[in-house]
Image (cartoon, rainbow, N blue to C red):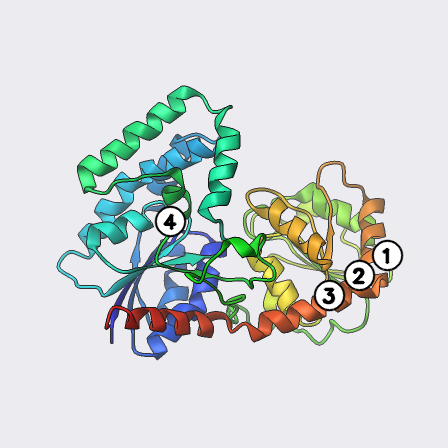
Amino acid sequence: MARVLFINSGSEGHVNPTIGVVEELVSRGEDVVYFTIEDFRERIEKTGATVRTIDVQAFIKAFISGGRNNVLERINGLLRTIDIMIPSVLEQIEGERFDYIIHDSMFGCGRILAQILNLPAVNSCSSFAQSKSSFDSMFNQLSENIPSETFDEYKRLTTMVEEKYGVEIQTPYEVFCNPAPLTIVYTTRDFQPVEEEFDQTFKFVGPSITSRKKYQHFDLTKFKGEKLIYISLGTVFNQAIDFYKLCFEAFGNTEYTVVMSMGEKVQQSDLGKIPENFFIKDYIPQIEVLKHMKLFITHGGMNSVHEGLFYGVPLIVIPQSADQPVIAAQVAKRGAGIQLQMQGLTAHQLLESADYVLSQPTFLQVAAKMKESFQQAGGYQQAVNEIIDFKRQYNM
């Protein structure tokens, strides 16, 4: 048995793919200590791991203080979180021994913490992977428009890390992507953009999907037929009253049955009259519902897209932020759905797009092939196989 230090951020998209991984590690005898935010304590504890928490407000405050205008400001924000996160983690594990560390790819201090503790590291990548060459190319193109004072701040922060923690940061890529000797990527090589750039230290294990076990007495028997649409904007961008009303206008009183998840921050009373063919809840057991759906209208988060395609459901992707435009473009490129833009979207366009995707058999055919590919990739079980093989290199 080895002791594992798992460091993650505090968002659904980064935590959910690791649930099955941690549960599988524990079932194979590993002792896992998992750092995340308090909101995920119960979910992680059910895997058998020990949970330690980070101060999410302090983390967010430090991250945002770096600025949001360009990629280097975001990197500076991640660097500012180091002086908050690392002392907290080190204090909470003082006197404990660990054999290896798994850190989230976008948790800025993961790689640095691995070096401080001198532990073999595994990078947990819940988005598309990014190679150093593609990152450097992107960064160089953008750097011409980055103010010199932002570079000065980056230099100050990296110097602070080196002086205070004895870790040298050689490139912004190290902060933004947290490279490690082994990177677990929760998608397939076929779905990964420019997959040829990634060597065998990147293991594409496919979607890591487990039942959320969060719902009770949810009647799925009513969702039958050929005209079932599921709509969700995820957990971050779901305060979209205007969009929900647009969906009413598009699909209300049509032959479609629409299941909509609107989150906990919008009240049904805010939406006005709800069409009779809509079924709306603040929480929908997405994985279970998708097994019955014919079309998924989504914001394009990695988890949601993977879950839709894991069950062979064609997609209409309306990206909101972050990496979602890249994910949406990949869905369209592979032919598993289409991409729309929220800005300027009309009810007619949305209805017409749904009619089009459902009437063209190629979308369903591609989604079915991706379902087969995703389900055969191995998911969290294959991820743990790769981690166990990695352990053997260090005689653990």
First reached walking from the N terminus: tag 2 or tag 4 = 4
Give the alpha-carbon distance from disc 3 to disc 1, as whole Å: 30 Å
Marks 1 and 2: CB-CB under 8 Å?
yes
Identify the residue position indicated by label 1 in the image: 253
* Numbered tag placed on residue 341 in the rendering: none
Give the spatial CA distance, label 4 vs label 3: 33 Å
Query: What percent of the width, then of the height, locates residue 258?
Result: 75, 60
Residue at left offset 26%, top offset 53%: 114
| Amino acid type, mark 1 | Asn
User: Which residue shows up at 44% across the image and 21% down it?
Assistant: 147
Left or right? Give the position of 41 relative to 246.
left
Q: Sequence order check: which comes first, mark 3 or mark 1?
A: 1
Write down the residue under mark 2.
Answer: 277
Q: In this figure, which residue is indicated by the disc labeled 3?
A: 366
Give the answer, above or below, for where 173 lies relative to 152: below
Residue to which mark 4 is pinned: 178
Q: Picture quarter containing residue 151?
A: top left
Question: Hey, what amino acid is under mark 4?
Answer: Asn
**Which badge, 3 or 2, is on the more N-terminal residue?**
2
Distance (Cα) linking label 1 and label 2:
6 Å
Report the mark closest to the observer, 4 or 1.
Answer: 4
Q: Amino acid at mark 3?
A: Val
Q: Compute the Cα span from label 2 to label 4.
A: 46 Å
In the image, taking residue 356 as reference, residue 320 lies left or right, namely left
User: Where does residue 80 sit, x and y in percent of width and height?
Assistant: 32, 36
Give how far apart the Cα atoms at labels 3 and 2 are: 28 Å
Rounded to the nearest angstrom, the CA distance separating label 4 from label 1 is 49 Å
Q: Earlier in the sequence, mark 4 or mark 3?
A: 4
Q: Disc 1 or 2, which lies upstream in sequence? A: 1
Q: Label 2 near label 3: C-beta < 8 Å?
A: no
Q: Nearer the viewer, residue 44 or 95?
A: 95
